[in-house]
Image (cartoon, helix red, strand yellow):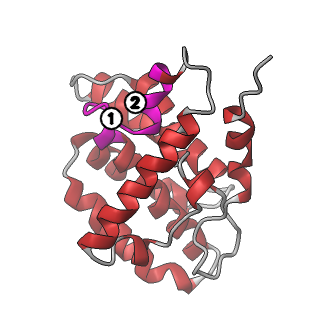
Amino acid sequence: MEDYRFYALLSRMRYITRWGLMRNTFSENIQEHSHMVAVLAHALALIRRDILGLPADPERCATAALFHDASEILTGDLPTPIKYYNPQIKAAYKQVEQISGDKLLELLPEALRPSYAPLIHESDETVVPIVKAADKLSAHIKCIEELKGGNLEFESAAKQTRQALEEMHLPELDWFMDNCLNAFGKNLDQL
């Protein structure tokens, strides 16, 4: 009997902490982050399809979002200032992510690899922009929640992530930011 390790490795996502260079009021791991990105990608795709009347596949977006950081199981979470420091580092890291994704796929039965490959490697061009927007939106929400907790360490990150979201010019993202984002700054009684 074969011993496929893909799913066991995925369960270790909870051990990889995000925002490692920042003082956090609460920690966030890539498993929690991936769940939130999936929720947001699903929401953005639904907004795109059901409110804006544009084509989108919410289930595919949510599934792709669940796996968008899977390669970090093998690479760890490289801090954003390093990851995007210059084009050479960015390209090299993309290559490392590709190799890491390939290694993960090798841990699956061969019959399942074609189904997982576009999720691990984010190759569906109709899904990628929505998942990227959800990923950045999740980061911005983390900043909002940290600021709400009095942690000014996230002030610059909040401004940077907000600007990046606005520069995406995705109608479903703009709709979400106009209609849903402010609620993340409220306390439980206000919700």
- Residue 43 is marked as none
Left/right placement of residue 66 relative to residue 23 reads left
Quarter location, residue 1: top right
Q: Amino acid under label 2?
A: Pro
Q: Amino acid under label 1?
A: Ser
Taking the spot 36% from the left edge, 31% from the top edge, the residue there is 45
- Residue wearing tag 1: 123
| Image: 3 above or below 186 | above
Left/right placement of residue 110 relative to residue 114 reads right
Taking the spot 71% from the left edge, 69% from the top edge, the residue there is 26
Q: Secondary structure at mark 1?
A: loop
Taking the spot 22% from the left edge, 54% from the top edge, the residue there is 168
Taking the spot 63% from the left edge, 33% from the top edge, the residue there is 107
Magenta stretch: includes residue 164: no
The picture places residue 48, in percent across and down from the top left corner, at 29, 31
| Image: 34 above or below 182 | above
Instruction: Work out whether residue 12 or residue 140 is closer to the camera in this orientation and state it.
Output: 12
Instruction: Work out whether residue 84 or residue 36 is closer to the camera in this orientation and state it.
Output: 84
Indicate which disc, 2 or 1, sits on the residue closer to the N terminus.
2
| Image: 82 above or below 34 | below
- Residue 118 is marked as 2
Inter-mark Cα distance, 2 to 1: 5 Å
Magenta stretch in the rendered image = 114-130
